Image (cartoon, rainbow, N blue to C red):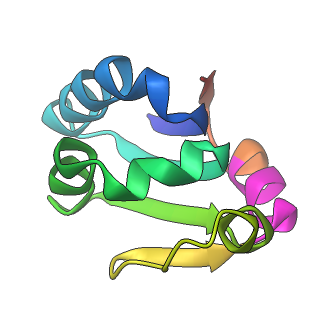
Amino acid sequence: MKLGVLITDRVFGGMVVPILKAALGRGDEVSVFLMDDGCFMAADEEFMKAAGRGGIKVSMCDLNRGQRNLELPGGIQAGSQYDNIAMVRWCDRLLVF
């Protein structure tokens, strides 16, 4: 299955990380898009560890990143709302946090 995950706030980190790990364990393809305060997930150690395991593509809204004065960490692609909608069209299932 192709799983898309849209994260809009860092408060959802505790829910998202176990889902990502479970999806990878099942052999699912996973794509994550970070926007709004979800961009702060790039500073979450557990999220970055899960994202760095392979099998997860992570993009971040570059406009939202700049508004929050965040650096783009390695392993995360700078993106736009075009990348968000591309993920939505690509995935079989979409989770929005």
Q: Is residue 46 left or right of residue 44?
A: left
> Which residue sits furthest front?
69
The verdict on residue 44 being magenta is: no
> Which residue sits furthest top?
15
Q: Main secondary structure of the magenta part?
A: helix
Residue 14: image location, x then y, percent: 30, 21
Q: Is residue 49 left or right of residue 91?
A: left
Q: Residue at x 15, y 54 (%)?
A: 49
> How many numbered circles are shown?
0
Check the image and report above or below for 15 versus 93. Answer: above
**The C terminus, quarter of image:** top right
Check the image and report above or below for 10 versus 46. Answer: above
Query: Between residues 68 and 8, which one lies in front from this camera angle?
Result: 68
Residue 94: image location, x then y, percent: 63, 28
Query: Between residues 14 and 96, which one lies in front from this camera angle?
Result: 14
Question: What segment carries the magenta color?
Answer: 80-87
Q: Is residue 44 left or right of residue 92?
A: left
Q: Residue at x 45, y 22 (%)?
A: 12
Q: Residue at x 83, y 52 (%)?
A: 85
Residue 59: image location, x then y, percent: 56, 65
